[in-house]
Amino acid sequence: MSKTYQFDVLIIGSGAAGLMGAIQLSEDLSIALIAKDKLLEGSSYYAQGGISAVLDSADDFDSHIQDTIKTGFELGNKQSIRFMVEQAPNAIKDLEKAGVKFSQQGKKYDLTTEGGHSAKRVAHVSDKTGQSVQTNLLAQVRQKSNITLFEHHIAIDLLMKDKQCFGAYVYDKQNDQVSSFISSKTIIATGGASKAYLYTSNPDTSTGDGIAMAYRAGCEIINMEFAQFHPTCLFHSHAKSFLISETLRGEGAKLTLPNGEPFMHKYDEREEMAPRDIVARAIDHEMKTHGFDCVYLDLSFKDSRWIAERFPTITERCLALGIDICNERIPVVPAAHYTCGGVGADINAQSSVENLYAIGEVAHSGVHGANRMASNSLLECLVFAKACAKHINSENIIDDLPSFNDWDASRVQHSQEKVVVSHLWQEVRRIMWNFVGIVRSNRRLETAHRRLTQIQKEVNDYYRLYILTEDLIELRNLVQTAQIIVESSLSRKESRGLHFTLDYPEQLESADNSVIIKTP
């Protein structure tokens, strides 16, 4: 039996952006917050590094802004970047009020440096910043009586009327039913799309759901060609998606070939501290040139006690797999890590569709340009979630909401061929890894586009014929998002930041955002 819920605000996603948004919204508003899996499952929870903010008297806003613009290859929105940077210290204070205890050195923050930063400005909680942020924000959310939490619910499509958004159809995974969540305002905070690639540092939830839903609703989708590959994911058969934080390189760790030879000096004068796109391409080139399965990251020259205290999570995880990082090198490979493009959103997080907002990794707020600078991601989540809530708090909430038909599953049947879904899942991810990866070409992109077009037709036919499952919902979104990445990549006739193509290896003097719009 289908249900209908009505709330003032629907938040789709329970990461740092979704939780912060819920906390900052007025307590006079009724809020539904839906989580695709468990409430703490998602990329935010697993963020190891930290949050960038100007917290030292030797640093300043202009330096943080210029580092962000430079790392983004001059494609970022300067107004949005300045807004984010200037709000960063307040974001840190908001987290401290929520209970987050940042690592200290004496009476000051234990700030560290990561790729692209010209100063120590990354505040962290050891190497488990995301975990601390998430658990403390969730504790704050649970204290608010106006917020209703829905775990194990996945949004299917946005509810649209007269080109306005009024909530979403949502699939309850545990009760196997679809409900209508009707709302005056809807916030998409579903995270990125790195699961579109075969190898990724992201959890299984990162399937591009919000991007695909917004695209089908007519939103502007911007700069999806800029898929960031983290240079150092742990290379081990039993280490699914485990990230080796960039902070290790910030603390002096060196990248080496299997024979112990360093190589980053050949690619950039900043060596290990070069931005992620440069480091990832360097590793990819060395692996392909020499036929290596991986390269190595070496921090073993540091004091063992310091390593264990500074990186307890990484030390323990590696040790469980038989790797003692205090005395030996860590095998690493690049993996899809972050979606720099997304749903076009302004400084108040408003999308191009009325009543619809986008925050966090799902959004293109303009702060990342052609490459995201390390530790600006959690910062973006927090700053724009707060701005989004402030804007909604000032808006008139619609009481007389339109009605929508219940979800109709009367003309579909149970599938006897679920192997089709699992096969297409794997095929999409292999296509993206092999043809739309770190280094691209028109021929590879066109090959990917042809096959993805065919797969999309097969998935849409399957979607119309059979009863919903979580895998089918995700596959439909995944193939749609993969196609957007390919189309965006084909539209950019240059190499810039994370998008490197053999057909256009030079960077143009100036460039525009790529924008893809789907008219419903």
Image (spheres, rainbow, N blue to C red):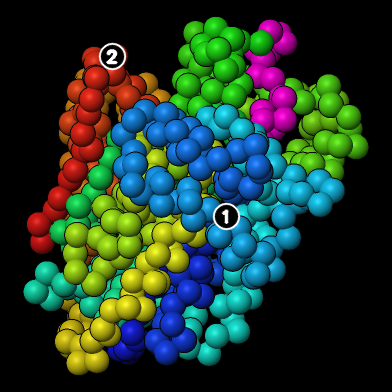
Q: How many marks?
A: 2
Q: Residues within 10 Å of mark 1 (few under 14, many from 20)?
A: some
**Seen from this angle, which residue lies furthest front?**
57
The part of the image, by quadrant, that contains residue 256 is top right
Q: Which residue is mark 1?
A: 89
x then y, percent, for residue 88: 53, 53
Q: Residue 215: which disc?
A: none
Between residues 169 and 95, which one lies in front from this camera angle? 95
Q: Main secondary structure of the magenta part?
A: loop
Residue 68 vertical placement versus 96 (above, below): above
Element on which disc 1 rests: helix
Q: Which residue is mark 2?
A: 506
Question: Could you tell whether 161 is left or right of 392 in the image?
Answer: left
Residue 238 vertical placement versus 393 (above, below): above
Task: Look at the image and tell me whether residue 245 can be seen.
Answer: no
Question: Could you tell whether 249 is left or right of 231 in the image?
Answer: right
Between residues 462 and 330, which one lies in front from this camera angle? 330
